[in-house]
């Protein structure tokens, strides 16, 4: 299986959780040892949004705000890559070609942000499209996808399965803004609809959910 794992910054970096990052690194090694090809995309979380605010307060435009956030996500990606050790590529992938080349070498790809105008969700979607992934799993700060924001509405209901069209209709945000924070951002949804890669959104605070998703066990929300 070709697998893309999207590690939400809200999970491993808000605040920075080195224990959880270590657990994920060990889990990715296990998945790789079982014969799967893996790409990991790490978000910048609260720290990235903090630097976006700094850039905004300095009067910098959206593109510059994004560039700062990308730098932060790449620092987390570098830390994760170093923790992976020899099974990871020699450097953080900075382009989709880098990701494909790394996978071709039989190594685990690790990426942060890619370019201004898209979030790490969209990066994960583009990587999935580029490498022909079978599955994209997002470790989120929620149990899955809900019919409305569970942080705002106590009566929100978790959805076990969705089509891409149903998924698109759930969200309020339809355009990119620096630091956008929702279960999967609008640009990523467009790419995922185009490629039709199977997506599972699950609780990222439980790394074992990645294994469950790979094994086809019921976990989180399946979008296909």
Image (cartoon, rainbow, N blue to C red):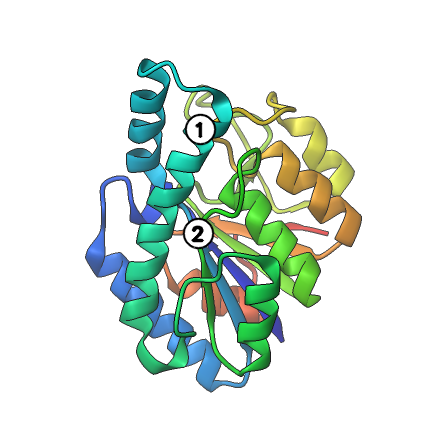
- Residue 45 visible? The answer is yes
Q: Which residue is label 1 attached to?
A: 64
Q: Label 1 neighbourhood size at 10 Å, few (<14), some (14-19), many (20+)?
A: some
Please identify the quarter of the rendering in which residue 136 is found: bottom right
- Which residue is located at x 71 percent, y 57 percent? 197
Which mark lies nearer to you, 1 or 2? Answer: 1
- Which residue is located at x 40 percent, y 51 percent? 204
On screen, residue 148 versus residue 130, left or right, reads: left
- Which residue is located at x 52 percent, y 37 percent? 183
Q: Label 2 neighbourhood size at 10 Å, few (<14), some (14-19), many (20+)?
A: many
Of marks 1 and 2, which one's residue comes earlier in the chain? 1
Using the image, determine if residue 162 lies above or below residue 208. above
Q: Position of residue 6 (x, y in %)?
A: 49, 54
Q: Which residue is label 2 attached to?
A: 112
Q: How many marks do you count on the picture?
A: 2
Using the image, determine if residue 86 lies above or below residue 110. below
Query: Secondary structure under badge 1?
Result: helix
Q: Quadrant of the N terminus?
A: bottom right
Alpha carbons under labels 1 and 2: distance apart: 16 Å
Q: Position of residue 58 (x, y in %)?
A: 31, 16
Instruction: Please tell me which residue lies in front, 89 or 12.
Output: 89
């Amino acid at each position: 299986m070709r697998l893309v794992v999207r590690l939400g910054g809200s999970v491993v970096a808000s605040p920075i959780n080195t224990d959880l990052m270590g657990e994920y690194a060990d889990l990715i090694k296990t998945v790789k040892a079982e014969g799967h090809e893996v790409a990991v995309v790490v978000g910048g979380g609260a720290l990235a949004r903090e630097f976006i605010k700094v850039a905004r307060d300095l009067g910098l435009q959206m593109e510059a705000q994004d560039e700062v956030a990308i730098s932060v996500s790449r620092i987390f990606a570098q830390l994760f890559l170093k923790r992976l050790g020899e099974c990871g590529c020699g450097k953080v992938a900075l382009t989709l070609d880098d990701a494909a080349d790394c996978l071709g070498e039989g190594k685990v790809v690790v990426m942060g942000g890619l370019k201004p105008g898209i979030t790490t969700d969209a990066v994960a979607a583009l990587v999935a499209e580029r490498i022909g992934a079978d599955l994209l799993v997002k470790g989120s700060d929620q149990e899955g996808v809900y019919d409305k924001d569970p942080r705002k509405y106590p009566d929100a209901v978790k959805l076990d399965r969705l089509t891409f069209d149903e998924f698109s209709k759930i969200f309020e945000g339809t355009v990119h803004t620096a630091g956008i924070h929702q279960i999967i951002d609008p640009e990523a949804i467009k790419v995922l609809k185009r490629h039709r890669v199977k997506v599972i959104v699950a609780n990222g605070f439980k790394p074992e959910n990645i294994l469950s998703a790979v094994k086809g066990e019921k976990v989180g929300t399946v979008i296909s």
